[in-house]
Amino acid sequence: MAVKKAWGGRFSAEMHKQVEAFTASIDVDRRLAPYDIQGSIAHARMLAKCGILSKAEGEKIVAGLAEIREEIARGEFQYDQALEDIHMHVERRLTERIGEVGGKLHTARSRNDQVALDLRLYLRETIGVIREGIRALQRVLVSKAEVHLNTVMPGYTHVQRAQPILLAHHLLAYFEMFQRDRDRLADCLTRVNVLPLGAGALAGTTLPIDRAYVAKLLGFPVVAANSEDAVSDRDFALEFLSASAILAMHISRLAEELVLWASAEFGFIELPDAFATGSSIMPQKKNPDVAELARGKTGRVYGALFSLLTIMKGLPLSYNRDLQEDKPPVFDAADTIRQMLEVLPPMLSAINIRADRMRAAASEGFLNATDMADYLVTKGIPFREAHEIVGRIVRHCIETGERLEALSSGKLRQFSTAFGPDVAKHISLEACVERRRSAGGTSSRRVAEAIQQAKRTLRRP
Ligand code: ARG
C-alpha cells in the first residue's frame, strides 16, 4: 500500500514511482537521524515552554523521540523511500508510537529550517573530530622532530638540493600547515554555530516561539538574523569544504614526500610493512599505497567543494530543493578526511627514518655553496661578487670531482685572496645548519624552541 504523503491534502493522484526514487534522500540523510532528533527534542521543549504545546504533550513527544533514537541506534528502524527523508521518517514513526499528538511536533517549523539545523549539528560534531585528528597528526610530527633534532637532510627548492636543514625543521613546516588548518576549522565553527530553526519555511512563524531558548538548549551562541537567509544559507558548509580542501592539499604534499622518500632514488625512509602493499606481479615491490591514496583522495575533497559551489551558484532566495544535494559532497569530504587522519598518524609514527641516507644526500651537491659565499661576504666582498667566485669554484669541483670543504686554502686563494684557513670549518654541514639562527631558521637552537612552542600550541583547544 502506498504511504500517505505529508502533503496528501492538496493532492489527488499518487506520486510516480520514478519521482519518488528521484526525489528521496533517505539513503543519504539517514545519518542525520541523531541530530534530527536532538533538534526536535529542543524544539518540542521550547513549544511546551511557550505554551504552544501542553506540558504533557511536550513530555510525550520528547520521550517518544528518545525511544526512536534508541531504535535507530539498535538498527531496528525501518526506512522507506516513500517517506522521502529522515525528517519525515522520524515524524511518521513518532506518530506511530505516541499517536496523534506526534503530529504536533512540526508546529512552527518547516523541513527547510530543520534540515539546515541538522547539517549544522552534524558539522559541529564532525569538525570537532577532524580537529582532534589533525592534532594527533601534529603530535606525531612533533615527537619525530624531537627524536631527529640533529638529523641533517638536504633542503630543496625546485626538487634540487639547495641548503642543508634539520629533518626536525622540515617536519615542523608541516606542523605549521596543519595548525592553520585547525585554526581555519575553528573559525568556520563560528559560522556553523548559528541557529536556523524558527525561520519556518522562509518567513518566520505566526506562533509565539522562543528561538533564543532553542539556541540555548542546543548550544548555539547566535540565532540566524534573517529567516530567508537561515533556510538557504550553506556558506558554513562551503567554508568547511574549503578548509577541508586546503587540509587535504597539505596532506597530499606530505604524502607526496613520503612517496618520493620511500623510493630507491631517495631512500630517506623505509615504510613499515603494516602500512605498505606488495605487487601481484613483481615480488620485490613494496609500495607506498597509503600515501598515494591520501594524495589521490584529495581530488574527491576538491570535487566536493566544487559540487557545492556549483549547486549554490545562482540560486534565488530562499529554499530550493537543489539544496538537498548539499549532503553527499559534505559527507563524502568529511568521511574522506576522517579516514586520512585515522591512517596517517600511526603510519607516520611507524616510519623508519634513514638518517644516514639523509646526511649523505646533504653532503653531496654543494649545499654549502651559499655559506662559502657568505664567508667571503664576512671578508668584505660584495655578495654578488662572492656568488660569482663561488660559482667558478663549484664549476671547478664538478670537473675534478672534489667537494668544496675539501679544497686547500692554497687552491681557494687562486679564486680569491679573501679565503683564509678557517673556511673549511665555516662550511661544514653542521656549521651551515647551526649558523641559520634567524627567527624561523633551521639551527638546532631555533628548532628546539619551535618544538617547545609547538607543544604549547598542542595544549590549546
Ligand atoms: N530533504 C530536504 C533537504 O535535504 C529537506 C526537505 C525540504 N523539502 C521541501 N520540499 N521543502 O533539503
Image (cartoon, rainbow, N blue to C red):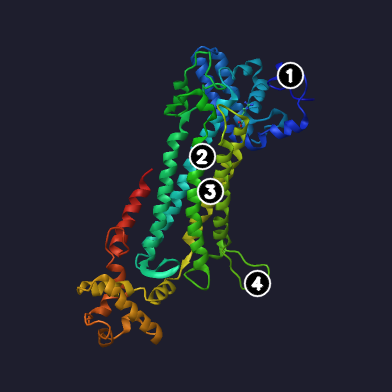
Q: Residue at x 45, y 46 (%)?
A: 132
- Relative depth, front residue between 109 and 22: 22
Give me the C-alpha separation between circle 1 and circle 4.
65 Å
Q: Which residue is drawn at 69% across and 20% down?
A: 7
- Relative depth, front residue between 4 and 187: 187
| Residue to which mark 3 is pinned | 337
Q: Specify the quadrant that holds the N terminus.
A: top right
Instruction: Report x, y in % for residue 259.
Output: 52, 64
Instruction: Report x, y in % for residue 277.
Output: 60, 64
- SS label for mark 2: helix
Q: Can residue 80 be seen in this view?
A: no
Label 3: few (<14), some or many (≥20) within 10 Å?
Answer: many
Lower sequence index among marks 4 and 3: 4
Disc number at residue 11? 1
Q: Specify the quadrant that holds the C terminus.
A: top left
Instruction: Report x, y in % for residue 208.
Output: 50, 13
Using residue 323 as the reference point, say whether residue 455 is left or right of it: left
Q: Residue at x 51, y 51 (%)?
A: 248
Q: Which amino acid does label 4 sit on?
A: Met
Give me the C-alpha separation between circle 3 and circle 2.
15 Å
State which image quarter holds ligand 1.
top right
Using residue 7 as the reference point, say whether residue 63 is left or right of it: left
Q: Is residue 455 visible?
A: yes
Lower sequence index among marks 3 and 1: 1
Camera-nearest label, 3 or 1: 1
Q: Which residue is drawn at 48% across and 49% down?
A: 246
Q: Looking at mark 4, is its residue's CB closer than 8 Å to ligand 1?
A: no
- SS label for mark 4: loop
Lower sequence index among marks 3 and 2: 2
